[in-house]
Image (cartoon, grey):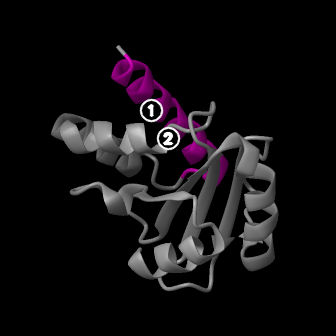
Amino acid sequence: FRKHRRRISRLLPDGDIQHIGSTSIPGTITKGDLDIAVRVARSDFAAANKLLAQHYARNTASHRSRSFASFKDDEADPPLGIQLVVNGGAQDHFLRFRDTLIADASLVIRYNQLKHRSTGLSAKAYRRRKSAFIMRVLSRATL
């Protein structure tokens, strides 16, 4: 993470670069990839999106909007995913999800169970299950 944070910081010195995903949550099952959230001001999003696209491949399996873009580097070790979001925007939920799981070991257990139960599903079906779980956790976290 530190290596990638340094590189991204050179590209986007005003970005808030955070380690997210399962590798950032102790005890969580992971497929071994590294996920990073890059949070930028709304006024910086378009330029940051263009700049990251010059250095990383777009993750075309993920949606894109005026406040969210996803990038990847499958050749990195471990493989890298970068989620660019507007700080405070609609898709700026990665840190809240991470921190909620870190604070609640029972949610980590449930998340791991979901991953076990999803073995053999298509990537689309797994993402649908995972997204539903994340939305339930986030709705609980805002109460």
Kindly identify the residue that appears in the image at 20 percent across and 39 percent down: 103
**In the rendered structure, are the residues bearing label 2 and label 1 in contact, judged by CB atoms less than 8 Å apart?**
yes
Which residues are the magenta region?
121-142
Q: Marks 2/1: CA distance?
A: 5 Å
Residue marked by disc 1: 133
Q: Is residue 2 above or below residue 137?
A: below
Kindly identify the residue that appears in the image at 29 percent across and 54 percent down: 25
The image shows a total of numbered marks equal to 2
62 lies left or right of 133: right
**Disc ID at residue 130:** 2
24 lies left or right of 77: left
Q: Disc 1 on helix, strand or loop?
A: helix
Badge 2: few (under 14), some or many (20 or more) residues near its Cα, within 10 Å?
A: some
Q: Disc 2 on helix, strand or loop?
A: helix
Q: Position of residue 3 (x, y in %)?
A: 45, 82
Residue 49 visible in image: yes
Q: Nearer the viewer, residue 12 or 143?
A: 12
Badge 1: few (under 14), some or many (20 or more) residues near its Cα, within 10 Å?
A: some
Q: Position of residue 44 (x, y in %)?
A: 72, 51
- Amino acid at pointer 2: Lys
Q: Is residue 40 magenta?
A: no
Kindly identify the residue that appears in the image at 17 percent across and 40 percent down: 105
- Amino acid at pointer 1: Phe
Q: Is residue 20 above or below residue 113?
A: below
**Disc ID at residue 27:** none
Q: Quadrant of residue 71?
A: bottom right
Kindly identify the residue that appears in the image at 52 percent across and 30 percent down: 132
Q: Is residue 127 magenta?
A: yes
* Residue at the extreme top of the image, as rendered: 143
Q: Nearer the viewer, residue 97 or 5?
A: 5
